[in-house]
Amino acid sequence: MNAADTVLPLQPLDRDRFAPFGEIIAIDPTRAPLIINDGTAQRHHALAHIDVDAAGAAVLSLFRAQPRALPFRLQMLERHPLGSQAFVPLHPRTRYIVVVAGADRRPQAFLAQGVGINLQRNVWHHPLLALDRESDFLVADRAGPGANCEECELAGGPWWLQPLPA
């Protein structure tokens, strides 16, 4: 890092701050679950809305993410113009960083642990940034014809994610 570099602060992931970019996938304590399966299960319904264009289909995949060491230099973003993209960690202790940006491509960073996120269609974001250990994620995404991944350089950088406080 040098003096021209910018440190990107990490914010806690919460519904209000993240709303311009997508949804948090977690149980909402203000909404009562549906009781199903003869009373043996609770369904927390419609936690995220998967959005794909008419030519595509919603698919589920597993991503195995390698941990990223901090400090980490952010250089690029990507977006998916034909569908939303959701990431749900398969272990409740999984920590990961979500980097998103608006149309100005100036990033914001959120620290997530044990909850998923659903990125709206066309939201600029950094590829998955798992922390601590190799981590598995269930990913809801779009499959089908058409170019569904665009990349760009970050504006106003270079940007760095710093190590988390102990």
Image (spheres, rainbow, N blue to C red):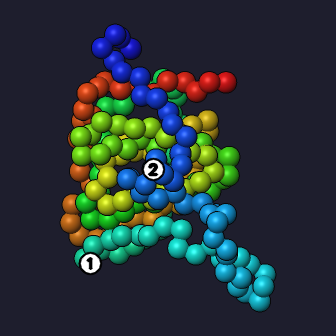
Res 26 visible? yes
Q: How many tags in the picture?
A: 2
Q: Secondary structure at mark 2?
A: helix
Q: Which residue is mark 2?
A: 18
Locate the N terminus by quadrant.
top left
**Contact flag, marks 2 and 1 (Cβ < 8 Å):** no
Residue furthest out toward the bottom = 38
For residue 145, side relative to residue 130 (left or right): left
Amino acid type, residue under disc 2 in the picture: Phe
161 vs 103, nearest the viewer: 103
- Which circle marks residue 54 in the picture? 1
Q: Where 157 falls versus 134 (above or below)?
A: above
Res 97 visible? no
18 vs 155, nearest the viewer: 18
Depth-wise, is mark 2 or mark 1 nearer the camera?
2
Q: Where 99 falls versus 42 (above or below)?
A: above
Which percent across, then down, holds residue 4?
30, 14
For residue 100, side relative to residue 38 (left or right): left
Q: Where 38 falls versus 100 (above or below)?
A: below
Q: Secondary structure at mark 1?
A: loop
> Can you tell which quarter of the image residue 51 is in?
bottom left
Which percent across, then down, holds residue 107?
35, 37
Point 37% across, 44% down: residue: 100
Point 52% across, 57% down: residue: 24
Which percent across, then down, holds residue 7?
41, 23
Point 43% across, 54% down: residue: 19
Query: Badge 1 local density, few (<14 within 10 Å), some, or many (20+)?
Result: few
136 vs 14, nearest the viewer: 14
Query: Badge 2 local density, few (<14 within 10 Å), some, or many (20+)?
Result: many
Which percent across, then down, holds residue 13?
53, 45
Q: First in sequence: mark 2 or mark 1?
A: 2
